[in-house]
Amino acid sequence: MYRYGQFCPIAIACEILTERWTPLILRELMVGKFRFNDLMRGLPLISRTLLAQRLRELETAGLVERTPKSSGRGYEYRLTPAGQGAQPIIMQLGEWGREWVYPEVMKRDLDPLLLMWDIHQRLHTDALPPKRTVVEFYLRGLPRSLPPSQKGMKRWWLVLEKPDVELCLTDPGYEVDLLVEADLFAMTRVWMGEQKIQDAQRELKVILRGPPRLVKAFPGWLKLSVFAQLPEQSMARTAD
């Protein structure tokens, strides 16, 4: 951990919160990912060694508490009151990035894993069908700049068993009820509130195939990103 050697509270907070990967680890913990492997799925480019090191640092700093799993081997990591107190800071970072730098870097940093991980975490579970429903995503337009580990991530499956949502990168073996064919950039724009899904459908950048009731219901399942803005807000910001 880098030490600034100053008593200024900003310096002291930055020593803990601005270490590489730390804000993103806190982001995952804040959305309810408590287990090591779940944190890895949300942060695919971090090494297991570095993730373990950062968790130890957060535990030492009093932001994270490590407890044995209720069943099986391993531990769970949960925010302490001090860690929960950092949530407004992390959210404000996201809001600042969304407002001032996001539009310029979104296409450069397309990430199918992060998109699908976000989607599976933020569905209106009350609106899901009463019986098991399988949604297959086929993502087109994956950038060549993706790391080798993500270049094959075109097909994903969501297994919806209300209120549970499971994300699969391999075929779960169930019949697919709804197919979502989407350009990765377009689906990311929809998720971030840059474009309405209905407009992306009209442009054939998002295509839904399945029973009409599921095609009609699907947009209502999406909560969108916590940083999503309405397209009208985005256009107004661009005009300014």
Image: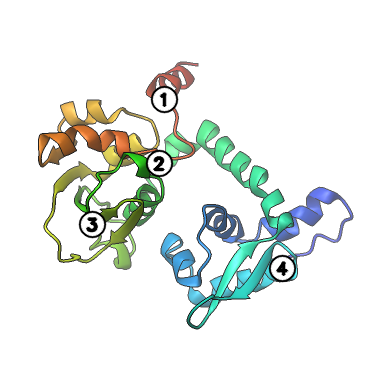
Q: Amino acid at mark 3?
A: Trp
What SS does tag 4 mark?
loop
| Residue located 40% across and 45% down the image | 122
What SS does tag 1 mark?
loop
Residue pointed to by mark 3? 157
For discs 2 and 1, the disc positioned in front in the rendered view: 1
Q: Amino acid at mark 4?
A: Met
| Residue located 62% across and 69% down the image | 54
Q: Amino acid at mark 2?
A: Met
**Residue projecting furthest to the front:** 130
| Number of other residues with Cα within 10 Å of mark 3, as a class: few under 14, some 14 to 19, many 20 or more | many
In-front residue for pair 15/131: 131
Label placed on residue 1: 4
Residue pointed to by mark 1? 230
Measure the alpha-carbon separation of dots 2 and 3: 24 Å
Dot 1 or dot 3: first in sequence order is: 3
Contact, mark 1 vs mark 3 (Cβ under 8 Å): no
For discs 2 and 3, the disc positioned in front in the rendered view: 3
From the viewer's perspective, is 116 left or right of 80? Answer: left
Contact, mark 2 vs mark 1 (Cβ under 8 Å): no
